[in-house]
Amino acid sequence: MKYRHELCLAVALLSVLSCKAQADSFHEALIGGKISGEVRNTYVGGSQSDARNGAAALNNSNVLGSALSLTYETGAYQGLKAVVGLQSGHDWGMQDDEQATIAGGEDDSRVSISSTDLLVAYLEYAVDKSLTDTRVRIGRQKIVTPLLMSSGEFPMQDSFDAVVIENHDLPGTQLRMMAVNRWNKRYGEDSNDTFVEDDLQYHNPVYSLYLTNNSISGLTVEAQWLSNRNDDPVGDPPAAVRTADKYDSGFLGLTYKIPDSSWILGAKALTANYDKLPDTGYWGVKAQTTVKGVLLHLGYTSMDDDGNFPGSIGHVPMFRSYKTGFIDEIFAGLETTSLRVGYGFGLPGANFNLIYSGWRQSDKGIAVSGRNLDGGYEAGVDLQYQFQRIKGLKGRLRTSYMDFDRPDVDKDDFLYTRVLLNYSF
């Protein structure tokens, strides 16, 4: 069977819980369980640009894909519960050419996935709170942290086989310790036979420690350390994690809301220390306020010349971004200045944003990163709506015009649109 080992894992998790409890207690745990799910639909459309190292995988795309995920969570018995979830994707076949966009066709393989796989399958144990406020998860699970995270941008999602220990004993503090030995990619075993990505089984576990603290009024502190001791690639392009080299990465983010005002200030710093490659990293600052219902957000990031930042392990180049556009801020030698203006127009559940990002990139950064974004910009709109009469239904429309300022090619501009309509239950 194609997914025999995943199905065996799911059955084993439920079996473990049944062995822990007496028959009647296990029955009560099953009755007390709940089913949840989500229907995810994504359309992407991009014009064709000759500036291929700028537009990259967004170029010349025309794809519609959907996915259904179903998850069952048992009730707890003496702090122990099991969670099992499946997902199945469907490609609606809108693309004229089955080749991936980066090869010149219309198929964006992140969307056109026809595959069924095991999304999550884990045991969770909550320790008696009189002893410690600690939870332990073992098995296949989704993880969301700045340096290690499951992607939720497209219909199908990825997950990790991991042990995660989460603790809340310190006031205003969440501490997570993670050991990951497998990355289960959203592609499953097939993506229309045009773009296949095998899951990654790590020879050495990837370890990470994540902390968030808000014990000081108005201040949120996030910090993370991640250690990769594998010589083989552990992550996703376009960042340098595809290069086979061990590295340690770090993240520090500060967000401060000034009392009695709408001002929010932020700063972040990231580092990546390699064994053989040049070390790299970047920093950024942001400021945000609201004036008469209009949100104003300004951000700036500066990336080192020596290499791309390795990003977040998973299909997410950088989760804690200061911009809302499509071009990532992680490329070597890149300075990104971003602006966002938002307004709700008095519509409950609505969020309308105008966005802009301007780029400056050093010559060394262009040579090292393989991307030339110097002098270019991205301008667009980001519209989000949470439907009020249909609980769980939400939509998002993002469209951007990009000018890569490339006099060496005939067509250096680009228009890209991504539409999401998701329903959770």
Image: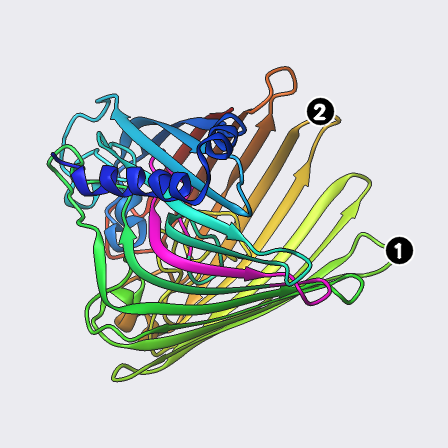
Return the disc, 2 or 1, that comes first in the chain's sequence.
1
Residue at x-position 44% and y-position 32%: 23
Residue at x-position 29% and y-position 37%: 11
In the image, residue 382 above or below residue 204: above
Give the residue type that dot 2 points to: Leu
Residue at x-position 27% and y-position 43%: 9
- Toward the right, the furthest residue is 260
The residue at which mark 1 appears reads as 260
CB under 8 Å between discs 2 and 1? no
How is the protein colored in the picture? rainbow
- Toward the top, the furthest residue is 389
Residue 150 spot, x, y in % from top left:
40, 49
Q: Is residue 153 magenta?
A: yes
Give me the C-alpha separation between circle 2 and circle 1.
25 Å
Residue 180 spot, x, y in % from top left:
34, 61
Give the residue type that dot 1 points to: Asp
Decide if residue 90 is on the left or right side of residue 44: left
In the image, residue 71 above or below residue 299: above
The residue at which mark 2 appears reads as 347
Q: Secondary structure at mark 1?
A: loop
Q: Which residues are magenta?
A: 149-174
Q: Quadrant of residue 149?
A: bottom left
Decide if residue 243 is on the left or right side of residue 1: right
Asked whether the viewer can see residue 304, the reply is no
Q: Is residue 18 magenta?
A: no
Between 93 and 113, the one nearer to me in the picture: 113
